[in-house]
Amino acid sequence: MSARSWPSSPLSAAARAFTLLVQPPTHVGFDGRGFDGLPDEILPLERLRALLLEPRTTVEVRDAVWRELVIRARRDGPAWVVAAVGIALPGLRHIAGLLASGWRGDTRDLDAELLVGFIERLTTIDVEPPRVVGRLIDAGLRAARKARDADSDAQLIHIDATGPIAPVQPWDHPDLVLARAVAAGVIDADEANLIAATRLESATLTQAAARLGITASLASSWRLKAERRLLEAIRAGDLAFVSLRPGRRHSAAVTHHRVAATQQRVAAIHERMTAAQQRVTPTASATQRQVATTDQRTALAQQRVVAAGATQQGRPVGSLLGRSDAADAVLATQQRALVGKTSDRESAGVGAPGIGARPA
């Protein structure tokens, strides 16, 4: 192959190198055996790339394949570095198109920085977290954006311009920053509405929380964590080139990242609620025991009152010391009137003179 036929664009050169790598006869192939969702055979790399781009391929399968590709690139030499770049080329080209939007310089410089950032990150990336290829492409994006921003800062105003010059893209309204953060899965729609209502509008946390159906303290916690993630994403440049085209469907990786972030937030709330319930449970149990003890004491008192009432249903036994209200006097310890023979009463002194007692 002559030097003239070799592409001058870095991404086109990477595509040509990948094409030459997979041309037969070649020893470079990916063993799909042991990977769920892949055929149980040695796959050519161009077929592996096509399978990874299919919508039916799950995020878990993509991450498993990319973990293996990163290990091969670190262990087995430059051929697998070219293979990794070639398989990620569709995503790299998409990012390169976003970088070229509004750019006045040579796009080949941006493409070169994009590839350098991708390959450098290939040697250091942690393969355990999800979105392996997404994080690799993000590293290339940050490297290219850094070079682009440095060049933009050094640009002078063109003397042949007859009017005001628009700033180099991207420029954003705060609402667009929140919208791009939602599109990138950094925050969800509820968190974006919460930030917009309380930071950009005049709503209070209590009012915004009432709209979401949560407490003001929980809304404050949501907003604090969302703003931290938003700040980190802005500083890292992750929101610089997120498209907001109408009707654009999100990729499976972005959707998975958004769902995972929401699930983590819900799990954190559940853990806090569980911890609060555990702190309340001992006090509640002690209170319940005290209430049960009080109920038992009240029941015993009621039983004693009922027993006393039944005793008072007995008839009066007679006048005491000649008082006229003796008919209302009742012996509390005696449930029946004294009855018996006359001789028994006399021997007992019941009818003795001076007492004035009369038979019941």
Image (cartoon, helix red, strand yellow):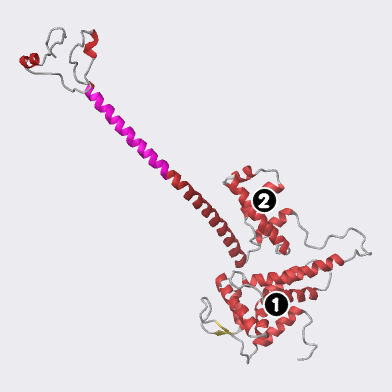
Amino acid type shown at disc 1: Ile
Residue 52's x, y, as percent? 59, 75
Location of residue 350 in the rendering, given as x and y in whole percent from the top left corner: 12, 13
Range covered by the magenta-colored residues: 285-311
- Disc number for residue 119: 1
Asked if 100 appears above or below 46 in the picture, the reply is: above
Above-or-below relation of 35 to 163: below
Question: Which quadrant is the C terminus positioned in?
Answer: top left
- The answer to if 299 sits in the magenta stretch is yes
Work out whether mark 1 precedes mark 2 in sequence or the reverse, and give the earlier one.
Answer: 1
Label 2 Cα neighbours within 10 Å, binned few <14 / some 14-19 / many ≥20: many
Return the x and y of residue 77 as percentages of the image width and height. Answer: 66, 85
Relative side of 215 to 347, left or right? right
Q: Is residue 10 visible?
A: yes
Callout 2 amino acid: Ile
Can residue 245 be spotted in the picture? no
Check contact, mark 1 vs mark 2: CB within 8 A: no
- CA gap between label 1 and label 2 equals 37 Å
Give residue 243's quadrant in the image: bottom right
Q: Quadrant of residue 103?
A: bottom right
The one nearer the camera, 270 or 102, is 270
Residue 151 colored magenta? no
> Which of the numbered marks, if any, corresponds to residue 195?
2
Percent coordinates x, y for residue 339 in the rendering: 11, 18
Residue 116, quarter of picture: bottom right
User: Local crowd at mark 1 within 10 Å, few (<14), some, or many (≥20)?
Assistant: many
- Mark 1 lies on a secondary structure that is helix
